[in-house]
Amino acid sequence: MVLKQIVIATTNLGKAKEFEKILGGDIDVIVPDDLPLVVEDGDTLAENAYKKARSAADHLGRLALADDSGLFVHALGGVPGVHSARFAGSGGDDAANRSKLIALLHDFSDRSAYFATVLCVCAPSATIEEAYFFEGRCDGYLLDHERGSEGFGYDALFVPSEGDGRTFGEMSSSEKAVFSHRSRAIAKFKISLSDLPG
């Protein structure tokens, strides 16, 4: 039985597939193709997630969920962080982002990093104080070369500490979901489904 209908506010097909796989039949996942462009200029993942969720909720007149995720590298003081998706510039893509990160880490022995996700569930016209937030984190380390072709973003570089030595890029979506920052945030969201409006 479908409990709720919630719009997933993303244009990233990789993210949309992760949401649909992890949420399963708990909610009716709707991925619209006509969302307004949102400038992600917040200082935190939570601010960016709220901006995207609020924009989608206002546009569609219904509850919306959005996330913002980032890779935080200790040796680089948390960079790329909130700028992870646009690390190589506005014209860059995932491959360019990975290449830039590999180059920056060339002289560092500390390869530790973590992925973080903040989900925001927002109703139309809701303030940031009225929105609901769910966080997830996955610690690990970065390789100096890519391994694997699954996933997206920095997955081919990131090895989760709790895993078996493979990168996220070498794992199936089901295997990645055991450890991933996004799946942990979604798990918290699923627990709170009955408390959400709509």
Image (tube, grey):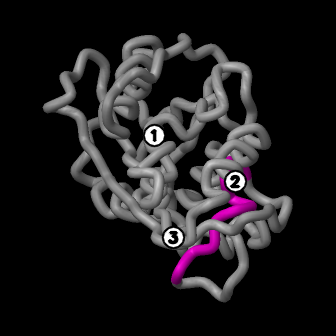
Nearer the N terminus, badge 3 or badge 1? 1
Q: In the drawing, does residue 159 fall left or right of residue 65?
A: right
Residue labelled with disc 2: 102
Q: Are the residues flagged by discs 2 and 1 in contact, CB closer than 8 Å?
A: no
Q: Quadrant of the C terminus?
A: top left
Amino acid at circle 3? Asp
Amino acid at circle 2? Ile
Q: Nearer the viewer, residue 83 or 57?
A: 83
Q: Residue at x 39, y 34 (%)?
A: 49
Amino acid at circle 1? Asp
Q: In the drawing, does residue 140 fall left or right of residue 173?
A: left
Q: Which mark is residue 110?
A: 3
Q: Which mark is residue 68?
A: 1
Count how many numbered circles sit on residues in the image.
Answer: 3
Q: Nearer the viewer, residue 128 or 30?
A: 128
Nearer the N terminus, badge 3 or badge 2? 2
**Residue 137, picture quadrant:** bottom left
Residue 19 is situated, as x and y percent measured from the top left of the image, at: 58, 51
Q: Residue at x 53, y 84 (%)?
A: 162
Q: In the drawing, does residue 193 fall left or right of residue 22?
A: left
Q: Nearer the viewer, residue 25 or 47?
A: 47
Q: Is residue 26 magenta?
A: no
- Marks 3/2: CA distance? 13 Å
Residue 157 is situated, as x and y percent measured from the top left of the image, at: 70, 62
**Residue 97 in view of the camera:** yes
Outermost residue to the front: 107
The stretch in magenta equals 152-161
- Marks 2/1: CA distance? 22 Å
Q: Of discs 2 and 1, which sits in the foreground? A: 2
Nearer the N terminus, badge 2 or badge 1? 1
As helix, strand or loop, the secondary structure at mark 3 comes to loop
